[in-house]
Image (spheres, grey):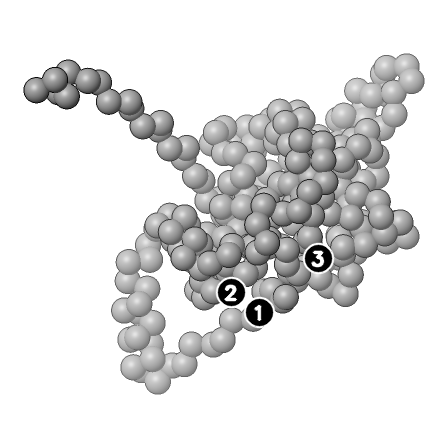
């Protein structure tokens, strides 16, 4: 059979997706914040160089990506100061390849609550700033660029935190969605929170990565059989 002599193309290996724990996210965020004064010290040694702009808060930035809508990097980079108000963040644009565009899908346009874990820090970050300013920037005050942030800040911070070096920036989104599902938040709510058009997308991409969930349904039904009622989860999104 001639067909047997044809070498079929090999499928490209899938990238490994990592789900970090919240303490691991906090550890990377802390290292990122430690790197800022180090950067400023280096700048001070060079004539004409300026310290990092006040809008450069890398630890807060990555924490927000996980805790507030499991944002894509472009969505987070596209935020303006005025998008944060009344304990909510309005996500309606993306910054990619030097251009402001709409989010990846229509479902990506959403409003999410600000996590209590970063609410104070975020409120301080936006205080007394112009509403049209980028919410976060690079040290030089320009909008965040994923390649620059990944190479100069993210990869070194992950290594210094003692984590797997191949953890990607996009794994922050994977972490936010996976942890929300692991916490028992309904997939429909998680999908709207993270900007998926359908909960089927949320489950097909992320649910398989939740270890230790094999007995979740059994444990939930046993709890109800003992007279325990599972609490409703707080809504994490709004239209």
- Residue at 72% across / 35% down in the picture? 99
- Tag shown at residue 74: none
Q: Quadrant of the N terminus?
A: top left
Picture layout, residue 134 above or below residue 222: above
Label 1, residues with CA under 10 Å away: few <14, some 14-19, many ≥20: few
Give how far across and how far down residue 146 sits, in percent: 64, 32
Q: Quadrant of the C terminus?
A: bottom right
Which residue position is annotated with label 1? 235
Whether residue 199 is visible here, answered yes or no, is yes
Q: Secondary structure at mark 3?
A: strand
Q: Nearer the viewer, mark 3 or mark 1?
A: 3
Q: Residues within 10 Å of mark 3 (few under 14, many from 20)?
A: some
Label 2: few (<14), some or many (≥20) within 10 Å? many
Which residue position holds label 2? Answer: 189
Dot 2 falls on a residue whose secondary structure is helix
Q: Residue 85 is drawn in which quadrant?
A: bottom right
Closer to the chain start, of discs 1 and 2, is 2
The residue carrying mark 3 is 90
Q: CA distance from mark 3 to mark 1?
A: 15 Å
Of residue 89 and residue 29, the one placed in the foreground of this image is 89
Decide which of tag 3 and tag 2 comes sooner along the chain.
3
Q: Is residue 201 left or right of residue 78?
A: left
Q: Position of residue 114 (x, y in %)?
A: 68, 59
Q: Position of residue 42 (x, y in %)?
A: 79, 20
User: Is residue 239 placed above or below 80 in the rendered structure?
Assistant: below
Which of pointers 3 and 1 lies earlier in the amino acid sequence? 3
Q: Are marks 1 and 2 in contact (CB under 8 Å)?
A: yes
């Amino acid at each position: 059979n001639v067909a047997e002599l044809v070498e079929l193309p090999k499928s490209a290996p899938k990238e490994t997706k990592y789900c970090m724990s919240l303490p691991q996210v906090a550890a990377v965020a802390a290292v990122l914040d430690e790197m800022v004064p180090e950067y400023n010290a280096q700048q001070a040694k060079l004539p004409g160089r300026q310290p990092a702009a006040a809008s450069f808060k890398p630890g807060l930035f990555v924490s927000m990506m996980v805790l507030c809508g499991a944002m894509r990097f472009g969505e987070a980079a596209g935020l303006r100061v005025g998008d944060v108000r009344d304990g909510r963040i309005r996500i309606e644009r993306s910054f990619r390849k030097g251009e402001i565009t709409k989010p990846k899908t229509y479902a990506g346009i959403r409003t999410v609550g600000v996590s209590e874990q970063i609410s104070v820090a975020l409120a301080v970050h936006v205080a007394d700033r112009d509403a049209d300013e980028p919410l976060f920037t690079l040290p030089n005050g320009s909008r965040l660029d994923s390649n620059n942030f990944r190479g100069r800040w993210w990869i070194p911070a992950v290594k210094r935190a003692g984590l797997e070096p191949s953890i990607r920036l996009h794994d922050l989104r994977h972490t936010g969605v996976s942890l929300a599902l692991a916490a028992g938040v309904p997939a429909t709510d998680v999908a709207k929170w993270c900007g998926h058009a359908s909960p089927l997308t949320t489950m097909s991409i992320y649910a398989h990565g939740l270890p230790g969930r094999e007995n979740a349904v059994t444990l939930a039904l046993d709890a109800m059989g003992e007279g325990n009622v599972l609490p409703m989860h707080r809504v994490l999104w709004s239209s």
